[in-house]
Amino acid sequence: MLHPALLATLALVSGLLQADGLTDLKTALSGLPQTAKVRVQIEEESRETEGGKEQIERRSRQVEEGPGGMRILADSRQPSAPATQKAAPVEDGGSIQAALRPSAGLLLDLAKARVLEEKAETWEGRPARRLKVSLELNLNQEARSHLKRALREATLWLGPDGLPYAMTERVELQIRMFLVASVRTQVDIHRRFLRTQDRLLVAEERSSVQGSAMGKAFRTLETTRCSVLP
Protein backbone atom coordinates (compact mmCIF):
# COMPACT_ATOMS: atom_id res chain seq x y z
CA MET A 1 0.00 0.00 0.00
CA LEU A 2 1.36 3.41 -0.99
CA HIS A 3 2.09 5.95 1.70
CA PRO A 4 -0.49 8.81 1.83
CA ALA A 5 2.21 11.43 1.24
CA LEU A 6 3.34 9.56 -1.90
CA LEU A 7 -0.24 9.31 -3.14
CA ALA A 8 -0.68 13.07 -2.66
CA THR A 9 2.52 13.77 -4.58
CA LEU A 10 1.49 11.50 -7.44
CA ALA A 11 -1.91 13.18 -7.63
CA LEU A 12 -0.28 16.61 -7.78
CA VAL A 13 2.17 15.54 -10.47
CA SER A 14 -0.71 14.05 -12.49
CA GLY A 15 -2.58 17.34 -12.25
CA LEU A 16 0.47 19.25 -13.38
CA LEU A 17 0.77 17.07 -16.47
CA GLN A 18 -2.82 17.69 -17.50
CA ALA A 19 -2.45 21.47 -17.49
CA ASP A 20 -1.01 23.70 -20.22
CA GLY A 21 2.20 24.94 -18.65
CA LEU A 22 2.84 27.89 -20.98
CA THR A 23 -0.70 29.23 -20.60
CA ASP A 24 -0.61 28.77 -16.83
CA LEU A 25 2.75 30.55 -16.68
CA LYS A 26 1.51 33.56 -18.65
CA THR A 27 -1.68 33.73 -16.59
CA ALA A 28 0.23 33.55 -13.30
CA LEU A 29 2.72 36.23 -14.36
CA SER A 30 -0.05 38.53 -15.59
CA GLY A 31 -2.01 38.11 -12.37
CA LEU A 32 0.71 39.26 -9.97
CA PRO A 33 -0.36 42.58 -8.37
CA GLN A 34 3.19 43.52 -7.30
CA THR A 35 1.91 46.38 -5.16
CA ALA A 36 3.46 45.46 -1.80
CA LYS A 37 6.40 47.58 -0.67
CA VAL A 38 9.68 45.69 -0.76
CA ARG A 39 13.20 46.59 0.32
CA VAL A 40 16.10 44.60 -1.12
CA GLN A 41 19.86 44.36 -1.25
CA ILE A 42 21.20 43.87 -4.79
CA GLU A 43 24.79 42.63 -5.25
CA GLU A 44 26.27 42.71 -8.75
CA GLU A 45 29.57 41.39 -10.07
CA SER A 46 30.91 41.51 -13.62
CA ARG A 47 34.03 39.73 -14.91
CA GLU A 48 35.15 40.50 -18.45
CA THR A 49 38.02 38.66 -20.12
CA GLU A 50 39.50 39.67 -23.47
CA GLY A 51 42.98 39.21 -24.84
CA GLY A 52 44.09 37.42 -21.68
CA LYS A 53 43.17 40.37 -19.43
CA GLU A 54 40.40 40.25 -16.84
CA GLN A 55 38.46 43.22 -15.54
CA ILE A 56 36.24 42.90 -12.45
CA GLU A 57 33.54 45.32 -11.34
CA ARG A 58 31.33 45.06 -8.26
CA ARG A 59 28.37 47.08 -7.06
CA SER A 60 26.04 46.89 -4.07
CA ARG A 61 22.73 48.76 -3.73
CA GLN A 62 19.81 48.88 -1.35
CA VAL A 63 16.55 49.60 -3.12
CA GLU A 64 13.00 50.20 -1.99
CA GLU A 65 9.97 49.91 -4.25
CA GLY A 66 6.28 50.31 -3.53
CA PRO A 67 3.22 52.36 -4.45
CA GLY A 68 5.34 55.53 -4.19
CA GLY A 69 7.84 54.35 -6.81
CA MET A 70 11.41 53.11 -6.62
CA ARG A 71 14.22 54.67 -4.58
CA ILE A 72 17.91 53.99 -4.07
CA LEU A 73 18.61 53.87 -0.33
CA ALA A 74 22.34 53.13 -0.62
CA ASP A 75 24.83 52.66 -3.46
CA SER A 76 28.45 51.51 -3.13
CA ARG A 77 29.37 53.76 -6.07
CA GLN A 78 27.97 56.86 -4.38
CA PRO A 79 29.13 58.62 -1.19
CA SER A 80 27.01 57.98 1.89
CA ALA A 81 24.20 60.49 2.21
CA PRO A 82 23.36 62.24 5.51
CA ALA A 83 20.66 60.50 7.50
CA THR A 84 18.35 63.48 6.95
CA GLN A 85 18.68 63.37 3.15
CA LYS A 86 15.93 61.69 1.17
CA ALA A 87 16.73 58.53 -0.78
CA ALA A 88 17.54 59.15 -4.43
CA PRO A 89 15.03 58.23 -7.14
CA VAL A 90 16.15 55.67 -9.70
CA GLU A 91 17.34 57.18 -12.99
CA ASP A 92 18.83 54.11 -14.69
CA GLY A 93 17.08 51.14 -13.13
CA GLY A 94 17.31 48.54 -15.89
CA SER A 95 19.08 45.87 -13.86
CA ILE A 96 17.04 46.73 -10.77
CA GLN A 97 13.75 46.43 -12.65
CA ALA A 98 14.89 43.07 -14.02
CA ALA A 99 15.42 41.82 -10.46
CA LEU A 100 12.33 43.35 -8.86
CA ARG A 101 9.86 42.97 -11.74
CA PRO A 102 10.93 40.03 -13.94
CA SER A 103 7.30 39.32 -14.95
CA ALA A 104 7.24 42.04 -17.62
CA GLY A 105 10.36 40.76 -19.37
CA LEU A 106 9.23 37.14 -19.14
CA LEU A 107 5.82 37.92 -20.64
CA LEU A 108 7.49 39.78 -23.51
CA ASP A 109 9.82 36.85 -24.22
CA LEU A 110 7.01 34.30 -23.95
CA ALA A 111 4.59 36.16 -26.23
CA LYS A 112 5.64 34.10 -29.27
CA ALA A 113 7.18 31.12 -27.46
CA ARG A 114 6.76 27.64 -28.88
CA VAL A 115 6.58 24.67 -26.52
CA LEU A 116 9.21 22.02 -27.26
CA GLU A 117 8.65 19.76 -24.25
CA GLU A 118 6.65 19.63 -21.04
CA LYS A 119 6.85 17.02 -18.34
CA ALA A 120 6.41 16.60 -14.60
CA GLU A 121 9.45 16.28 -12.37
CA THR A 122 10.74 17.70 -9.10
CA TRP A 123 12.79 20.80 -8.42
CA GLU A 124 14.79 20.72 -5.21
CA GLY A 125 12.39 18.13 -3.83
CA ARG A 126 9.21 19.98 -4.80
CA PRO A 127 6.74 18.85 -7.50
CA ALA A 128 7.23 20.92 -10.64
CA ARG A 129 6.58 21.10 -14.35
CA ARG A 130 9.64 21.35 -16.57
CA LEU A 131 8.71 23.47 -19.57
CA LYS A 132 11.12 23.77 -22.50
CA VAL A 133 10.33 26.49 -25.05
CA SER A 134 11.79 28.04 -28.17
CA LEU A 135 11.96 31.85 -27.98
CA GLU A 136 12.02 34.38 -30.76
CA LEU A 137 15.27 36.17 -31.56
CA ASN A 138 14.70 39.90 -31.95
CA LEU A 139 17.01 40.54 -34.90
CA ASN A 140 16.57 43.01 -37.72
CA GLN A 141 16.49 41.94 -41.35
CA GLU A 142 20.12 42.86 -41.99
CA ALA A 143 21.34 40.74 -39.08
CA ARG A 144 19.18 37.82 -40.20
CA SER A 145 20.71 37.96 -43.68
CA HIS A 146 24.15 37.17 -42.18
CA LEU A 147 23.04 34.36 -39.87
CA LYS A 148 24.62 30.94 -40.22
CA ARG A 149 23.16 29.55 -37.00
CA ALA A 150 20.63 30.90 -34.52
CA LEU A 151 19.14 29.30 -31.41
CA ARG A 152 17.28 30.65 -28.41
CA GLU A 153 15.72 28.17 -25.98
CA ALA A 154 14.66 28.30 -22.36
CA THR A 155 13.72 25.75 -19.72
CA LEU A 156 11.51 26.72 -16.80
CA TRP A 157 10.55 24.80 -13.65
CA LEU A 158 7.04 25.80 -12.62
CA GLY A 159 5.35 25.39 -9.26
CA PRO A 160 1.70 24.40 -8.67
CA ASP A 161 0.70 28.09 -8.87
CA GLY A 162 2.16 28.39 -12.38
CA LEU A 163 5.00 30.70 -11.32
CA PRO A 164 8.61 29.71 -12.01
CA TYR A 165 11.01 28.36 -9.44
CA ALA A 166 13.95 28.66 -11.82
CA MET A 167 14.86 29.20 -15.47
CA THR A 168 17.78 28.55 -17.78
CA GLU A 169 18.20 30.17 -21.18
CA ARG A 170 20.66 29.60 -24.02
CA VAL A 171 21.30 31.75 -27.07
CA GLU A 172 23.68 30.68 -29.84
CA LEU A 173 24.53 32.92 -32.77
CA GLN A 174 26.96 32.50 -35.62
CA ILE A 175 27.15 35.34 -38.11
CA ARG A 176 29.12 35.45 -41.34
CA MET A 177 30.59 38.86 -42.22
CA PHE A 178 32.75 40.12 -45.06
CA LEU A 179 32.68 36.71 -46.80
CA VAL A 180 35.37 35.12 -44.60
CA ALA A 181 35.07 36.68 -41.14
CA SER A 182 32.61 35.29 -38.61
CA VAL A 183 31.26 36.18 -35.19
CA ARG A 184 30.25 33.41 -32.78
CA THR A 185 28.40 34.11 -29.54
CA GLN A 186 26.91 31.86 -26.87
CA VAL A 187 24.87 33.19 -23.96
CA ASP A 188 23.87 31.05 -20.96
CA ILE A 189 21.60 32.49 -18.26
CA HIS A 190 20.54 30.80 -15.01
CA ARG A 191 17.87 32.39 -12.81
CA ARG A 192 16.36 31.46 -9.45
CA PHE A 193 13.11 33.17 -8.48
CA LEU A 194 11.72 34.13 -5.10
CA ARG A 195 8.07 34.72 -4.18
CA THR A 196 7.55 37.34 -1.47
CA GLN A 197 4.11 38.74 -0.63
CA ASP A 198 2.47 39.54 -3.99
CA ARG A 199 5.78 39.81 -5.86
CA LEU A 200 8.07 37.60 -7.89
CA LEU A 201 11.76 38.53 -7.59
CA VAL A 202 14.93 37.21 -9.21
CA ALA A 203 16.88 35.93 -6.21
CA GLU A 204 19.94 35.12 -8.33
CA GLU A 205 20.94 35.46 -11.97
CA ARG A 206 24.18 34.16 -13.46
CA SER A 207 24.90 34.95 -17.09
CA SER A 208 27.82 33.92 -19.26
CA VAL A 209 28.57 35.46 -22.65
CA GLN A 210 31.42 33.96 -24.64
CA GLY A 211 32.51 33.72 -28.21
CA SER A 212 34.92 35.06 -30.78
CA ALA A 213 34.98 37.94 -33.24
CA MET A 214 37.61 38.48 -35.91
CA GLY A 215 39.71 35.71 -34.39
CA LYS A 216 39.68 37.19 -30.87
CA ALA A 217 37.99 35.37 -27.99
CA PHE A 218 35.97 37.13 -25.33
CA ARG A 219 34.05 36.13 -22.22
CA THR A 220 31.88 37.97 -19.71
CA LEU A 221 30.46 36.55 -16.48
CA GLU A 222 27.81 38.53 -14.60
CA THR A 223 26.16 37.61 -11.31
CA THR A 224 23.29 39.43 -9.61
CA ARG A 225 21.91 38.44 -6.21
CA CYS A 226 18.83 39.99 -4.65
CA SER A 227 17.89 39.45 -1.00
CA VAL A 228 14.88 40.84 0.85
CA LEU A 229 15.64 43.19 3.74
CA PRO A 230 13.43 43.60 6.83
Image: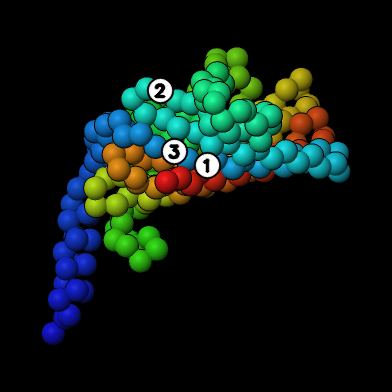
Sequence-earlier tag: 1 or 2: 1
Task: Classify 154 as above or below 178.
Answer: below
For the N terminus, the quadrant is: bottom left
Q: Pointer 3: what residue?
A: 39
Task: Classify 118 as above or below 186.
Answer: below
Inter-mark Cα distance, 1 to 3: 7 Å
Q: Are marks 3 and 2 in contact (CB under 8 Å)?
A: no
Residue closer to the observer: 1 or 28: 28
Label placed on residue 41: 1
Asked if residue 49 lies left or right of residue 104, the reply is right
Q: Pointer 2: what residue?
A: 69
Bin the neighbour count of mark 1 within 10 Å (Cα to Cα): few under 14, some 14-19, many 20 and up. Answer: some
Asked if residue 64 lies left or right of residue 85, the reply is left
Give amino acid for label 2: Gly
Bin the neighbour count of mark 2 within 10 Å (Cα to Cα): few under 14, some 14-19, many 20 and up. Answer: few
Inter-mark Cα distance, 3 to 2: 12 Å
Give amino acid for label 1: Gln
Residue closer to the observer: 26 or 205: 205
Residue closer to the observer: 104 or 203: 203
Farthest-out residue, bottom: 1
Q: Residue 113: x, y in percent?
A: 37, 33
Q: How is the image coloured?
A: rainbow
Q: Residue at x 35, y 46 (%)?
A: 195
Q: Are marks 1 and 3 in contact (CB under 8 Å)?
A: no
Question: Where, by quadrant of the figure, is residue 45 drawn?
Answer: top right
Q: Residue at x 82, y 35 (%)?
A: 215
Q: Residue 138: x, y in percent?
A: 50, 23
Q: Is residue 70 visible?
A: yes
Asked if residue 33 lies left or right of residue 56, the reply is left
Q: Residue 134: x, y in percent?
A: 42, 38
Give amino acid for label 3: Arg
Question: Where, by quadrant of the figure, is residue 88 drawn?
Answer: top right
